[in-house]
């Protein structure tokens, strides 16, 4: 189906961590399986291109940066 698109933002201020959000710390890899499990999504429904883009963004984080990952579901 691939109807779930991942979105991400790089943040540098840990004070912005409010509510339940999925974060990747610099030096860590984005785990799409863990993300899907955290939000009770089917891993196979995650858009592969957005998963790849999110993994690349996580790999390019600099020390002191975090990636905030969210998703949107196509209607």
Image (cartoon, rainbow, N blue to C red):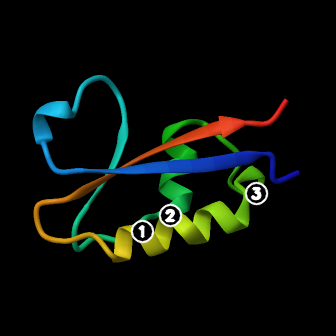
Q: Which residue is drawn at 37% across and 35% down?
A: 21
SS of the residue under disc 3: helix
The residue that mark 3 highlights is 44
Q: Which residue is drawn at 33% across and 76% down?
A: 60
Q: Residue at x 76, y 57 (%)?
A: 44
Q: How far apart are marks 3 and 1 (CA)?
A: 21 Å
Q: Toward the viewer: 2 or 8?
A: 8
Q: Give the side of residue 32 with respect to residue 3, left or right.
A: left
Q: Give the side of residue 30 with respect to residue 44, left or right.
A: left
8 versus 51 height, above or below: above
Marker disc for residue 5? none
- Which sits earlier in the primary sequence, circle 3 or circle 1? 3
Which quadrant does the C terminus fall into?
Answer: top right
Q: Give the side of residue 16 with respect to residue 64, left or right.
A: right
Label 2 near label 3: C-beta < 8 Å? no
SS of the residue under disc 1: helix
The residue that mark 2 highlights is 54
Please state the horizontal and vertical placement of residue 35, each as a whole percent of the image: 50, 50
Mark 3 vs mark 2: in front: 2
Q: Toward the viewer: 10 or 33?
A: 10
The residue that mark 1 highlights is 57
- Which sits earlier in the primary sequence, circle 3 or circle 2? 3
Label 1 near label 2: C-beta < 8 Å? yes
- The quarter holding residue 13 reads top left
SS of the residue under disc 2: helix
Q: Give the side of residue 59 with respect to residue 48, left or right.
A: left
């Amino acid at each position: 189906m691939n109807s779930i698109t991942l979105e991400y933002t790089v943040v540098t201020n840990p004070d912005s961590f409010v509510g339940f959000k999925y974060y990747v710390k610099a030096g860590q890899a984005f785990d799409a399986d863990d993300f899907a499990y955290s939000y009770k999504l089917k891993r196979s429904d995650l858009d592969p291109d957005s998963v790849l883009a999110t993994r690349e963004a996580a790999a390019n984080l600099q020390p002191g940066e975090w990636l905030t990952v969210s998703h949107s579901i196509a209607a």
